[in-house]
Image (cartoon, rainbow, N blue to C red):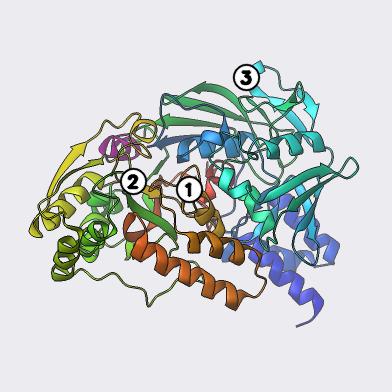
């Protein structure tokens, strides 16, 4: 294959993935000297049947908004605010549709040989816009100071950021001229750019020498026009954003909070919205048959978790935790709660899409083994509470009842508490001793481990502390040999599975549903549900 053929093949791939519009396509083929007839053949090929179109109004029904939501990304914990943030703001690095780190506000980067120092070249000519001001004019140009201040809010002992664990290894951030940000790590970090793909990180303008976390201004594809937390958000295309010719297809977008699963599906089938996330899996077979509806199914590392705070009795007893784990019916969970949209889990957070996933690690459903561990714990007949809500994940209430039946079979007395939907993430998760939860997928292992499974991490929702895990996470982060990293991550999986404080019966798929007026790329990005949280700017209205 010659160089020209390679370029033609790459153009076809970009067309298929929706990364080129017609103007960009014609420009590239012209520059390559491809004849108009050849270009026309490419343009009319099957790969172009799903080409993005500009214009239209997209209405979205999402299920996890809260009335206490704010624009402060350091506190984000659910999809609605991630989507809003990634529509109006940018990071310096994104997760591409191939799962790899891809340029955003940083147009390129390089590391030192020891992977301790990373240099990010910041894109020039980018401007901030504040849609809430009512003006479409830029308010300021992006500077390295904005980037540095936006990084530093996640660092230090006093930071309130949930991403503290992700940024903990950063020892210094500084400017080198007016277009380069230098990030120093205390220890080697082979995946340094990926820390900036964490959804808590976005670049905001500097005001009075500090990052303005609550600012409605951003460099993204959309203006924020209206923000009513937990109710409704409206966005309008910014025709002058630096990505305007490539991303952000709909002229305007409305995001409506619809917490009830049935109401969300009804809104889609009745035509009130065009897109929903997390359709009820219990009735998804009926939704599939609805005219004009399409299901978006993306296998992922989404983890259905059930954290037990290990500093609170009886969950401070590992034999008691193991008794619960061995009496949790995992295949039943996949079959009856996920209706097949899942993969049996093993009580550790690294899912089957990771190359390091240990497929030999299994936690079998074994009531006799569960009774043995319960006897060792000395807590036979113990009574305990489990909090749940379908806000945690669709089917979480039914799952709790399924678990309870089996826990009762070994002589325990669980009380299932159905919590209110609104405020679940602020009042229940990471506060109540035992609850239902889910963790969206991350692109690399370190991003989930460092935020939730190392000692002292802000979102360590089980308060677990396993010194060997802490050690391995740091070692793997800096290991350049993939085979050795895999060995380390598999040991981490084994330790968390047997000593950790969460029950993970399954990993799931990211499921969404659209009407036929919505165009979706053939390949969906990772790093989170809804196209990595980028669906507003990557999906389009067909007419």
Circle nearer the N terminus (2, 1): 2
Q: Is residue 519 visible?
A: no
Residue 530 is marked as 1
Task: Measure how far apart labels 3 and 1 are at the Cα level.
Answer: 25 Å
Per the rendered image, the range of residues in magenta is: 259-268
Image depth: mark 3 or mark 2 in front:
2
In which image quadrant can residue 523 be found?
bottom right
Q: Which residue is mark 2?
A: 309
Q: Is residue 282 above or below residue 37?
A: above
Residue 506 is left or right of residue 221, and the answer is left
Report helix, strand or loop for mark 1: helix
- Callout 3–callout 2 Cβ contact below 8 Å: no
Circle nearer the N terminus (3, 1): 3
Residue that appears at 63% across and 25% down: 216
Residue 87 is left or right of residue 261, and the answer is right
Image depth: mark 2 or mark 1 in front:
2
Secondary structure mainly formed by the magenta segment: helix
- Residue 264 in the magenta stretch? The answer is yes
Q: Which residue is mark 3?
A: 132
- Callout 3–callout 1 Cβ contact below 8 Å: no
Task: Measure how far apart labels 2 and 1 are at the Cα level.
Answer: 30 Å
Residue that appears at 30% across and 40% down: 265
Residue 324 is left or right of residue 148, and the answer is left
- Residue 47 in the magenta stretch? The answer is no
Q: Is residue 339 above or below residue 76?
A: below
Q: Residue 417: image x %, image y %? A: 19, 37
Q: Residue 369: image x %, image y %? A: 18, 70
């Amino acid at each position: 294959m010659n160089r020209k053929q390679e370029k033609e093949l790459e153009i076809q791939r970009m067309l298929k993935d929706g990364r080129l519009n017609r103007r960009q396509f014609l420009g590239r083929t012209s520059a390559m000297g491809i004849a108009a007839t050849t270009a026309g053949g490419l343009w009319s090929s099957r790969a172009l049947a799903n080409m993005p179109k500009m214009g239209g109004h997209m209405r979205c029904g999402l299920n996890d908004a809260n009335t206490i939501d704010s624009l402060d990304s350091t506190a984000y914990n659910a999809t609605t605010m991630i989507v809003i943030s990634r529509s109006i703001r940018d990071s310096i690095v994104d997760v591409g549709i191939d799962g790899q780190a891809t340029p955003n506000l940083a147009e390129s980067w390089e590391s030192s040989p020891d992977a301790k120092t990373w240099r990010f070249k910041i894109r020039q000519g980018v401007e901030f816009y504040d849609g809430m001001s009512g003006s479409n004019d830029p308010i300021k140009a992006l500077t390295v100071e904005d980037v540095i201040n936006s990084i530093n809010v996640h660092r230090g002992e006093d930071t309130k950021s949930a991403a503290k664990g992700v940024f903990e290894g950063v020892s210094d951030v500084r400017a080198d001229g007016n277009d380069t940000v230098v990030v120093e790590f205390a220890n080697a970090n082979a995946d340094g750019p990926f820390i900036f793909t964490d959804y808590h990180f976005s670049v905001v303008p500097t005001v009075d020498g500090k990052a303005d976390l609550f600012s409605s201004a951003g460099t993204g594809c959309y203006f924020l026009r209206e923000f009513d937390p937990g109710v409704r958000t409206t966005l309008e295309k910014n025709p002058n954003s630096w990505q305007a010719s490539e991303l952000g297809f709909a002229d305007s977008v409305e995001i409506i909070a619809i917490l009830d699963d049935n109401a969300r599906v009804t809104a889609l089938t009745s035509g009130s919205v065009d897109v929903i996330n997390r359709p009820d899996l219990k009735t998804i077979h009926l939704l599939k048959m609805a005219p004009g509806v399409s299901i978006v199914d993306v296998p992922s590392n989404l983890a259905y978790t059930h954290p037990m705070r290990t500093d609170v009795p009886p969950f401070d007893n590992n034999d008691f935790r193991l008794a619960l784990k061995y009496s949790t019916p995992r295949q039943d969970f996949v079959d009856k709660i996920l209706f097949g949209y899942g993969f049996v889990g093993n009580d550790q957070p690294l899912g089957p899409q990771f190359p390091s996933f240990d497929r030999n690690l299994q936690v079998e459903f074994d009531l006799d083994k569960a009774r043995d561990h319960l006897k060792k714990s000395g807590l036979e007949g113990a009574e305990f509470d489990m909090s749940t809500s379908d806000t945690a994940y669709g089917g979480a209430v039914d799952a709790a009842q399924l678990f309870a039946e089996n826990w009762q079979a070994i002589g325990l007395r669980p009380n299932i508490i159905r919590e209110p939907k609104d405020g679940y993430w602020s009042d229940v998760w990471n506060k109540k001793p035992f609850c239902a939860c889910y963790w969206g997928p991350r692109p690399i292992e370190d991003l989930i481990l460092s935020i939730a499974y190392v000692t002292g991490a802000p979102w360590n929702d089980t308060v677990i502390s396993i010194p060997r895990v802490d050690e391995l996470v740091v070692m793997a982060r800096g290991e350049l040999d993939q085979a050795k990293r895999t060995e380390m991550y598999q040991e981490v999986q084994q330790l968390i599975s047997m000593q950790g404080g969460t029950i993970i019966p399954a990993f799931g798929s990211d499921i969404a549903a659209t009407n036929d007026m919505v165009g979706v790329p053939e390949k969906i990005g990772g790093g989170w549900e809804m196209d990595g949280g980028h669906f507003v700017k990557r999906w389009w209205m067909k007419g």
